[in-house]
Amino acid sequence: MIELVDAVATVGIDIANVAAAGPPADLPGPVPDFVGDVLGSVRSFIEGSIDNLGKAVSDLTPGGN
């Protein structure tokens, strides 16, 4: 009987630890506008309509490097 109580207590602690380790309460801020364009370029590269992904991303990002 003591082993069962210990096992139940351990499971209770594990569940509490998992619940406490959930996602953060604060969400990150919005991403810059060009991020959607970069993701679109990656999609186009995968589909084969862009040959040089590095150049396409470089052209879209601030600073161009």
Image (cartoon, helix red, strand yellow):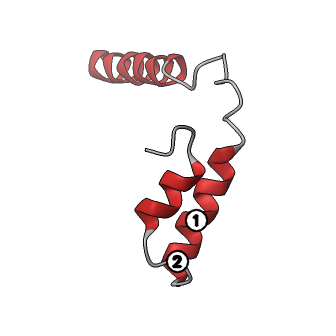
Q: Quadrant of the C terminus?
A: top left
Locate residue 8, reporting x and y percent. Answer: 41, 22
Which residue corresponds to mark 1?
41
As displayed, is residue 17 above or below residue 58? above
Q: Residue at x 55, y 82 (%)?
A: 47
Q: Nearer the viewer, residue 30 or 49?
A: 49
- Depth order, front residue of 8/24: 24
Q: Quadrant of residue 23?
A: top right
Mark 2: secondary structure: loop
Against 8, residue 42 (above or below) is: below
Q: Quadrant of residue 26?
A: top right
Q: Residues within 10 Å of mark 2 (few under 14, many from 20)?
A: some
| Label ID, residue 22 | none
User: Which structural element holds mark 1?
Assistant: helix
Check disc 2 and give the amino acid type: Ile
The three-letter code of the residue at mark 1 reads Ser
Give the total number of marks visible in the rendering.
Answer: 2
